[in-house]
């Protein structure tokens, strides 16, 4: 929090200094300074940033991945075996069309959540995946860590469904895909 405040104040101060000096016009540099002043406040909502000429930056850092992996471990989501995963149609697209594979993963997770809801006579027919996970967690049909993992993954997977993923890093894709498969395995076990 202190970092966010200090960063914002520094960039706003530089912006004000540019306005006070008449020879400094409000130009692209001024606008960039204002944007940078607010970056610490919304950076948590951005997964990847691509700047022309500079390349792509992955904004899901190792600490965030460790935190999500910890939740997965606490939820009892273990590494899936390949043979288990080949039952999913989207698994074959993992390397040929990764975006479509992520979209398929998201659809399959929602499908399994709906089956769990129906098996327990819960009406979640008009809810999205996030609300469905919340309801299932409230009824203790999935644990809080599984719900948290669903919330962490749903933004990325929704981007795949809506074809909003531009470029991606293969390491991040593999991590999201593997975590999603492990989550699916855990959710499917609840149907047995």
Image: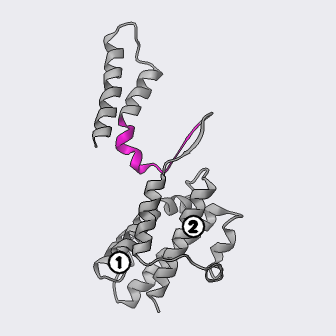
The residue shown at (41%, 50%) is 45
Please state the extent of the stretch shown in magenta in the rendering: 38-51
**On screen, residue 3 above or below 139:** above
Residue 177, numbered circle: 2
Question: Which badge, 2 or 1, is on the more N-terminal residue?
Answer: 1
Q: Is residue 127 visible?
A: no
Tell which residue pokes out farthest to the top in this image. 23
Q: Quadrant of residue 181?
A: bottom right
Residue 114 in picture, x, y percent from top left:
43, 81
Q: Secondary structure at mark 1?
A: loop
Image quadrant assignment for residue 103 = bottom right
Is 58 situated left or right of 12 in this image? Answer: right
Compared with 34, 184 (above or below) is: below
Q: What's the coloring here?
A: one colour
Please, which residue is most extreme toward the bottom here?
192
Residue 166 in view (yes/no): yes
> Residue 32, how many percent across, how many down?
44, 28
- For residue 65, which numbered disc appears in the image? none
Q: Residue at x 52, y 80 (%)?
A: 185
Q: Which residue is mark 1?
A: 143
Residue 10 position, x and y percent, is 33, 27
Left or right position of 18 against 185: left
* Alpha carbons under labels 2 and 1: distance apart: 21 Å
Give the residue displayed 56% in from the left and 71% down from the top. Answer: 105
Indicate the position of residue 137 as horizontal and vertical percent values. Answer: 32, 77
Q: Does residue 39 show up magenta in the picture?
A: yes
Element on which disc 2 rests:
helix
Label 1 packing within 10 angstroms: few (<14), some (14-19), many (20+) = some
- The stretch drawn in magenta includes residue 67: no
């Amino acid at each position: 929090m202190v970092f966010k405040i200090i960063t914002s104040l520094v960039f706003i101060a530089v912006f004000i200094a540019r306005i006070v000096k008449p020879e400094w016009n409000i130009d692209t540099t001024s606008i960039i300074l204002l944007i940078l002043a607010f970056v610490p406040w919304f950076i948590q909502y951005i997964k990847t940033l691509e700047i022309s000429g500079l390349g792509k930056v992955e904004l899901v850092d190792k600490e965030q991945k460790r935190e999500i992996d910890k939740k997965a471990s606490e939820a009892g989501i273990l590494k899936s075996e390949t043979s288990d995963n080949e039952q999913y149609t989207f698994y074959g697209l993992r390397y040929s069309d990764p975006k479509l594979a992520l979209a398929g993963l998201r659809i399959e997770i929602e499908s399994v959540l709906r089956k769990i809801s129906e098996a327990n006579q819960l009406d979640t027919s008009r809810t999205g995946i996030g609300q469905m996970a919340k309801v299932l967690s409230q009824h203790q049909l999935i644990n809080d860590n599984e719900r948290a993992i669903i919330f962490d993954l749903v933004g990325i997977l929704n981007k795949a469904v809506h074809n909003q993923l531009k470029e991606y890093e293969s390491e991040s894709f593999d991590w999201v895909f593997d975590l999603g498969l492990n989550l699916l395995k855990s959710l499917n076990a609840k149907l047995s």
